[in-house]
Amino acid sequence: MKIQVSDKAHQWYIEEMGLEKGDSVRFFGKVYGKTEIHDNFSVAINIDRPNDPLVTETVDGITYFIEKSDDWFFSGYNFHVEYNEELDEVTYHFVE
């Protein structure tokens, strides 16, 4: 499993969340919503520090990560984060 954050998605996070080098963004599952592979769950994010990371990707000094405790939500898939210009928001894709 790996995380892939596109350059445009990375820039969107910097602008929307005020990220700076050294910051970390955690992806995890939350109740309510829907993803390509889950009903009643969606992707949540917060600024946090890795404690026991399952996977990380660092782009320009900012670390994106998923904790091992969230493996149930992402298991069996690579996690791609892209930017949708039409919607002006990031989109999440679970890729086998």
Image (spheres, rainbow, N blue to C red):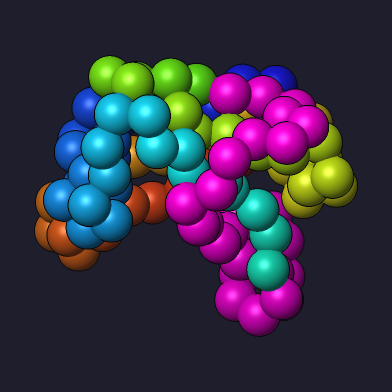
**Magenta residues?**
31-56
| Residue 26 seen anywhere in this rendered image of the structure | yes
Which is nearer the eye, 58 or 33? 58
Residue 5 relative to residue 95: left or right: left
Q: Residue, x 28% and y 19% (percent of image)?
A: 60
Which is nearer the eye, 81 or 24? 24
Q: Which quarter shows the C terminus?
A: top right
**Quadrant assignment, res 3:** top right
In the image, farthest residue toward the bottom: 32
Residue 1 is inside the magenta segment? no
Asked if residue 39 is positioned above or below residue 16 in the image, the reply reads below
Residue 36 relative to residue 72: left or right: left
Which is nearer the eye, 85 or 7? 7
Picture coordinates of residue 11 (x, y %)?
19, 38
* Main SS category, magenta section: strand
Residue 7 relative to residue 72: left or right: left
Q: Residue, x 58% and y 24% (percent of image)?
A: 56
Q: Which quarter shows the N terminus?
A: top right
Picture coordinates of residue 94 (x, y %)?
60, 40
Q: Residue, x 38% and y 29% (percent of image)?
A: 22
**Quadrant assignment, res 38:** bottom right
Picture coordinates of residue 50 (x, y %)?
64, 35
